[in-house]
Structure formats: structure tokens, C-alpha cells
Image (tube, rainbow, N blue to C red):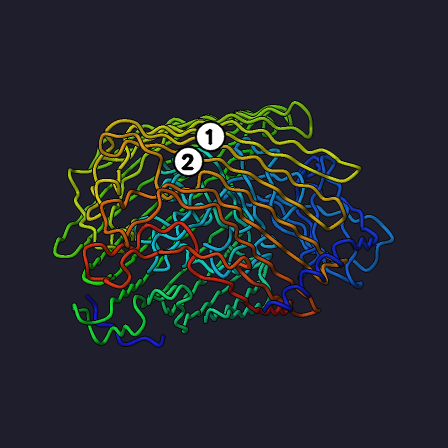
Amino acid sequence: MLNIEKSRFLSGKKLILLALMQALIILNVRGQSLLGYVHEEVESGHEPLIGASVFWLGTTIGAATDIEGKFSIAEPEKYPAKLVASFVGYSSDTITVKNNKKEIEIRLKQSVQLGEVVVSERQAGSSFKLLDPVIAENISSHELGKAACCNLSESFETNASVDVVMTDAVSGAKKIQMLGLDGVYTQIQAENVPLIRGLSSNYGMGFIPGTWIESIQIIKGPGSVSNGYESMVGQINLEYFKPDQAEKLFVNVYGSMGGRVEANIQSGHVFNEKVGMNINVHASSVFRENDMNKDGFLDMPRSQQYNLMNRWMITHKRLEFQLVLHGLYDDKIGGQLGFKPSQGIHSDSPYGIRITNRLANVHTKTGYIVPNVSDFSIALITNWRYHDQHSYFGFKSYDGVQKTVNTNLIFLKRFNQDKHTLKAGLNFNMDDYQEAFNDSAFGRQELVPGAYAEYTYVIKQKFSVVGGFRADYNSKYGWFYTPRLHMKYNPTDKTVLRLTGGRGYRSSNVFAENSSLMASSRKVNVLEALNPEVSWNYGVSASHQFSVLGKPASVYTSFYRTDFENQVVLDLDAGTQKINVYNLKGASYSNSLQSEITYEPVKRFEVKVAYKWNDVWMHTGTTMRRKALLMQHKFLTTLSYATNFNKWQFDLSMNVNGPSRIPSTSSNPEEYQLPAASPWHAMLNLQVTKRFKWFDLYVGAENLTNFRQKNAIIAANDPYGPFFDASLIWGSQMGINPYLGLRYRLK
């Protein structure tokens, strides 16, 4: 253990806000529009760019180009105004518009290709890609601003594809679930660089401030082989703000009734056409001791976090280089009221927890467009990470150190006007873990060189197929072979059908990935040497855009199945005093169905209704059981309305969550027993934003239904006894949590 110095850690008004929102929703103020075109500048002239983004600098007013490269965008508050056009793989352009008396023409030049090219047919806060062979949902920074979104774990509150749940009732850690499976089976990256894995699996969702994120892409099913073999059920990729996208100065401050305060300061500067830089600074703290359910434990640990990121971009002719530096310190203190780390842990002291994370990360991207060879580029991505974690939960302790190196060399060649694309590459990963759980120390090192190739064939706006294969040699487990296939067919220009399938692998990190092992008196028994997890994932989806009474609408439906060849099982059904960990004996599978309808009955008023069904089973012991602590049904409804020029914005989201199976506690004394399943329950969030010339003011409240899980901690009155268990968590512990925030922009 490290010796770290002591840390310091509306009823009537709500009705008025709801009434005001309902009154403003019926308004339909229409403004004039500015028309224009975005073209690609080529040697033979110019070609229209489909799906290019166009927006007024310093606002959230935007549009996207159609199949002719044409756009229509609402006028700014006043002229002159700066109009920005951007498209992935092209250099952005900013022009000054003095009036709307003539159409605007913008021409973009191709830049270095460093990542995936994703094309959107129309701009929206959250939208599915109609032209991409791989099903991808894009969440923009505008969508992220509809909720408190203080960090990545809160970025999916208005999204039906990803669920965020608590890992236990004492640490405050959150994890995602996708296609009915834990987030460790989803590959989470930042700009195609590994982000949350290993030691960051439990707490890393809280390490990425929401204001840093420019957009999030969610891919269901196995993704591109160029990103590795660890994408088993999906990929989540973040894009941070780049120097040419960031404000000269952006400040966000936030405070909640729960005692959470935070500040974000971000600045971007382009020195000249070759060099740009931005810096992001974050500091946050939870200083208040909350115990809304009166069980004697903090609902959320006291905490301090300091977070810094610095990016440099250098462009010279055909070469582009990026350097990103990231450092973090995060300290959490929780447990029973009155616990002080300086007192230590003993049987007569309050039960306490402390979790300290230190992280340093450096990654680079180098891209080069090869001269005299049409549409051929090379990119090299490197990543170095050091992460140490020290924690204790009462008498249980876990310390870990992770050292990771990733490199990825990518070759990209396009043929016949992008009809054919070949991507190939070489990569190398090194993971070194040194861990200690209680009195046991153990370590593991994996060296994994690999190679891959991926071919894309496209018939314009009609059919496309992406087939990929990679082979990797793991120094601990041997060869991994990863085939993947994605197909897309457009029966009409508004309808898309997709089919996908592929294989995935991962090495488990049992203690680093499961803080629930720490949050109880259960004894952890690792019964055998654990093998890599292996799964096959298959999926089909359909999306369609249409009109209802002349207003735009869309519908999306998907079904995915995951079958495991091997899975590391955490058996909570083995008994109430133990957790057995072993390789899968028998079958394990997941079926996930999702349907979603979006409709805009009135201009700037968007309604989204979604339903998700998860049917997940696995063998634990000798019995096939439904996966524990997983919601089988979920309904999501979001309402979003903005007045003209986005002066006011109102956002309401409601989740109705179905039952979860709770592992049997029938052998406990009667007062420590739980029901077999959780009840249906609803969560309601509301936010109102007022935009001024230089800043936004937003006010909201989370969990307006004030729903809280009863008996979230078993035997809370005897935390050192044999029946103490804070790992059987399925609902919220915090009640109504009002908050207030301000966003300031210096353009």
C-alpha cells in the first residue's frame, strides 16, 4: 500500500420547468436558410462531397450535404459569420459569409488518412450511418450536451445501444453493457487507440471528461480487424476536439446537490498552417457525504481527480504528425460514514475503502500520402501507457501495475474511384501486469505480434462488403485467428440492410476488471488456470428513413447473437459466502434485440422511443441460468426541443428498466435475504439550457422519480461479518440530484 496523504475530500420549481418546456415545445419559429455546396478539389476539377459537415463557428447550428454536395443551413444571428466545412480525410475550411444573397461554394482538399472513414447522410445529435458498410451510430458533442455528461460513463444517458450500470454499491465505479454483455467484451478506443482495458476497466469510464469529446462512434458486432482482435460484441471510439475544432478558450463549471463539483478548461490554437495545439485541463471533487438510503454507507465516495491532456498537430505537405500526452490522478475514499483513512482498518473501525489511480499515456499518429501513387497512404499509430492502482475494501486489498505498448502500421490503397479499397498492416502489443490480491502476488506478460488485411468493395450507394482476416501470436496462449465480414445493401436510397459476423478473443484480468470481488465478504476461489475468452458474434440490422405528415422520421432494428467457445465465469450462484472463478463448462450465449423510432413532429422537436430485449444465459456450476444482475427489458424515451437559433433547449429522457435476476440469498439469515428478481423501475432526467452570446447556462436534475434500490448492501450493519455483500447492485442509490452548470466560449 502506498501511504498517500489525507484527502479533503424542488418540487414547485420542477413543475414550473416542466410546464415551461411543454409550452415552448408547441412553438414553431421558422427562420430563413442559406444554401451552398461542398466539393472535393481534384486534378480534373471538382466532385460533390456527400455527408460533409457544415456549421456556424461557435454554435451548434449545423447541416450535412446531400448526394449532390448541397446543403441548407439556418442563418446565423447576424452577419458577417464564419462558416466551417469539414469531412473525414479532408482538410477543414472556414469562410466568412457577409450575407445570404448568393449560394456558397466550398472546396475541400484531401488530407492524410489516419483513421476510419465514416460518412453520414445527415447531421443529427445521434444518428446511424446510412452509407457505411459497418453499422455505426454517431453521438455528437451536441447530443452529449443534452445531459450533465461530466464524464464518459454519463455520455450514454440518451442512447439505447449502451447501458451504464454500477459495479457495486460502495466504490462508485461504473461499467457499460452492450448486447447484453459486460463492457470488457466491447473494445473502447480513443481515435483508434486502445483506451479502457486492463486496470482501467473498472474506473476508466470516469477518467474521460465529457467536454473533451467531439463525438462518439458506436459499432455493434465485431468491428474492423485493423483495430485488433478484442472487439467481441462491439466497438466504441471517441474523437477528441482537435486544435482546429477547439475554441480559443472553453470553460465548463458544474455543481450538484450531491456535492460534486468540477471545472474544465480547454484551449485550442493554430499557430500557422503547419502547427496546431490544444490543451485540456480537468479538476473535480465529491466533497459531500451522501447517505440517502440511511444504511450508514456513503452512496458515492468522496473523491478528487486531476486530469491533463495536451495535443500537438504538425502538417507538412503530405505528412501529418500528432502527439498526445495524458496524465491523471484519481483518489476515492468511501465506506461507512465517519471513516478516515488515517485511522487504518481494523475490526473496531468503520468499514472503509480507498482507490487511488495514477495514469500516464503517450500516443502518436504519423500519416503520409505517398507521392506519384494515386490514393495510397501509410500511417503509424503508437501508444505507451503506465497505470498503477492501489485499493482496499475493508480487509481486502488489490494493487496493480500495468505497462502497455501498442503499435499499428497501416497501409491503405484505393482503386477505381474508391470502388475497391485494400487495408493491410502489422501491429504489436505488449501487456505487462504485476498484481497483488490480499496476500497473493502474481504477474503476467503477453507479447503479441500480428498481421491483418481487409478488403472493401463498394457499388455506389447500393451494395458494399468488407472482409477481413488477421492472425496474431500470443506469447502465452499461442495463435489467434480472427475472420470478420460486413455486408450492406441499400434497396432504396432511404433503406439499409446489414449483415455482420466474426470472431473475437481477449485475455481476462479477473481482479482488475471486477471490483465486485472486493465489495463483499465472499471468498474468491480461482479454481483453475484461466484460458483466453473466445466468441463468435453474428448480427443483422435494418434502418429506414421516411416521412409522417411531411415530417422526417426514421426507424432502426437490429438483432445480434453471441456464442462463447470459452468464457471466464464469475459464479455468484456457488454460495452466498464465495465466488468461484473458472473456465466455461457448457454453453454461454447472448441474444439482443433493439428497435428505435425517431420522429420530428415539429421543427427542432425530436422524439425518440426505443426498446431493447436481452436474453443472456450461461452455465454456472452444472445449471444453465439467466445472467445475473442484467436487465432483460429496457424502454428509453427522449424528448428534445430547441427554439430558433437554439436560444433555449429542453431535454427530457426516461428509462423504464425491467427485472434482473438476483443470485440466490436463501441460505442467508432471513433479514439478509433478497427477492429472486429486481422490480420494474423508471428513471427520469431533465435539463434546460439557455444560450447567450458567449456562454450557456444549464440546469437539470437526475433521477426525478427518486427511485433507489432497497437493501443495496446486505448486512450493512455488520460489514466485517460473513454476510456483508455490496456486489448485488442493479439500481441507483442516489435520489433526486439537481445540478447547475455554465459553459463559456471565447471564439
Q: Which residue is mark 2?
A: 233
Q: Residue at 30% x, 38% y: name it.
A: 506
- Residue 25 left/right relative to 10: right
Please report whichever mark, 1 or 2, sits nearer to the chain's N-terminal start: 2
- Residue 268 left/right relative to 385: right
- Quarter placement of the C terminus: bottom right
Residue 455: percent from left, percent from top? 48, 27
Seen from the viewer's position, the closer of residues 104 and 657 is 657
- Vertical comparison of 681 with 585: above or below: below
Q: Which residue is mark 1?
A: 560
Q: Could you say which quadrant of the image residue 644 lies in?
A: bottom right
Q: Which kind of residue does numbered mark 1 sit on?
A: Tyr
- Vertical comparison of 249 with 104: above or below: below
Q: Residue at 63% x, 65% y: name it.
A: 14
Cβ atoms under marks 1 and 2 closer than 8 Å: yes
Q: Is residue 404 visible?
A: no
Q: Is residue 245 visible?
A: yes
Q: Could you say which quadrant of the image residue 562 lies in?
A: top left
Residue 518: percent from left, percent from top? 25, 55
Q: Residue furthest left?
A: 439
